[in-house]
Amino acid sequence: MSKFKNFLEALGGAFHLILETIKIGFQRPIYTKLILDQIYHIGVRSLPLVLIVAASSGMVMALQFGYGLAKFGGKLYVPKIVSLSIVREMGPVFACLMLAARVSAGITSEIGSMKVTQQIDAIRALGTSPLKKIVFPRLTACMIAIPMLSAGAIIVGVAGGLMVGSLELGLDTQFYLQKIFTTIKLNDYLSGFGKTFFFAFFIASTSCYYGLTVTGGTQGVGHATTKSVVTSSILIVAGDYFLTKFFLVIEQWL
Amino acid sequence: MAIIEVNNFSKKFGNKIVHKNIEFQVNKGECLGLLGGSGAGKSVILRSLIGLEKPDTGSIKIEGEEIVYKTEKELIEIRKKVAYVFQNGALFDSMNVFDNLAYPLKEHTKLNQQQISDEISKILIEFGLDGNEHIFPSELSGGMQKRVGLARSIIINPHIVLFDEPTAGLDPFNTIKIQETILKLKEKGMTSIFVTHDMPSAFAVCDRLALVQEGKVTCIDTVQNVKKDENNIINQFIKGYYV
């Protein structure tokens, strides 16, 4: 019960931290260089991981569905099923789970180490704000880089499925491409892509919060990093259900 | 004229009462040494003077301005006037020495890049650190880290400097270097508080000494009186009779 209470406290704390950060983040001066640095660290350096995972998951899904559906004569449905599930669910969720592990761990351990070595206190003592200097650049970078990486993951995932479909399952490439374009509608893409902004928010808020609340030296940094990865992953997986419902309702309105 | 005034300062962490009704004043240009056993809460007092900790009750005035109820944003102006020298330097480990020193100049002055470089070159020579601009903190010795930390704190000419054990763990050469720097700052009229266990340094740089015991300031006296009066509480503390 106390663990659940701590979890809820952390969620509240993270949300409050982000509200405070947004309040002062857009006031001058805006540290553009720090934001660009973070986009490089969070975005560019995560690119190989995200693309490899996306390609593999697309390939594996195509393979599994191909052999599974072949038993019922349904191999021709592979392009539709694989591309739709990657665009709406698997692409964004897998990419963000990978990023939750890599980015959350990186941010929390970096901020946590700064906390235990009094560098966060030094930022404050030198008349500057850790929210502006540390949290805002990471939050902004996550909100920009994570959706872009996820968009890339969706494309590469579908391409992975296409590759296995044509090379391994013997499906015609033209046929596969045609099925992708006739199946995937803009709202499918926006539903999957739209979620990634929420996932980016979950990753940035929890990782910064756990980093800034580290206590207990280097061991505390380790604990905080684990908690950060677990919490952001849980938020992504659990939040995905509610976000799917939310986007389905929006699609019905449109 | 008192530049720092602390009245009825109380602070507890959880159920542990660290301070109850701490009171002291520091006059302009004066250096007050804050003594006390390990865990007596000297650093907590120091951190509170710059708003890094909030007291539970009481008042802290810096140059006549109450800081206890100020927000983080309002405290920025206070922190330009009051510098804090951390025990371990607290240098930004992702930045080299030059960038660490440039940090306060970029944030709080309108100097251009050339003027910033000139200021940094000047202070590096003053602190015997010239030639180390491009070295990262992890490659510096403990003494050099402390000197860079001290240089970073005073580079924008604050009115008050708070020293948290600046000579702890240093060899005699570096200790004397730090003492000389503090004495130079005093000559320029800078007010300071010096938390330390290093009595030779305290005697060398402080005008008065205050003893923190069991959450209270039990004695404040001039260095001369402490040295000459065998029965003075601070004198006895230095000799190891009290903790």
Image (spheres, rainbow, N blue to C red):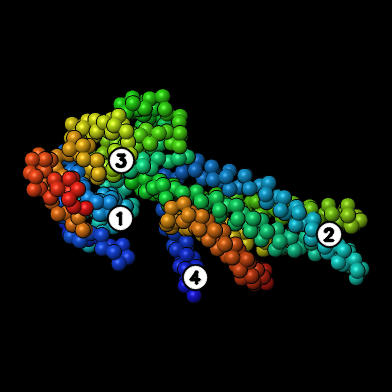
**Residue A231 vertical placement versus B169 (above, below):** below
In the picture of the structure, the residue carrying the numbered disc 4 is A3
Q: Which mark is residue B132?
A: none
The answer to whether residue A174 is visible is: no
Q: Which residue is depicted at the point 14% across and 43% down?
A: B208
Q: Using the rendered image, report if marks 3 and 2 lie on a common chain.
A: no
The quarter holding residue B239 reads top left
Which amino acid type is marked by label 4?
A: Lys
Tell me the mark number nearer the camera, choosing from 3 and 4: 3
Identity of the residue drawn at 82% across and 59% down: A62
Marks 3/2: CA–CA distance: 65 Å
Question: In screen coordinates, is B224 left or right of A63?
Answer: left
What is the chain identity of the residue bearing mark 1? B
Q: Earlier in the sequence, mark 1 or mark 3?
A: 1
Q: Secondary structure at mark 1?
A: loop
Category of crowding for the residue at label 3, using alpha-carbon neighbours closer than 10 angstroms: few (below 14), some (14–19), many (at least 20): some
- Same chain for marks 3 and 4? no
Pointer 1 local density, CA inside 10 Å: few below 14, some 14–19, many at least 20: some
The circle drawn on residue A63 is 2
Q: Circles 4 and 2: CB distance less than 8 Å? A: no
Which residue is under mark 1?
B53
Query: What residue does disc 3 label?
Result: B168
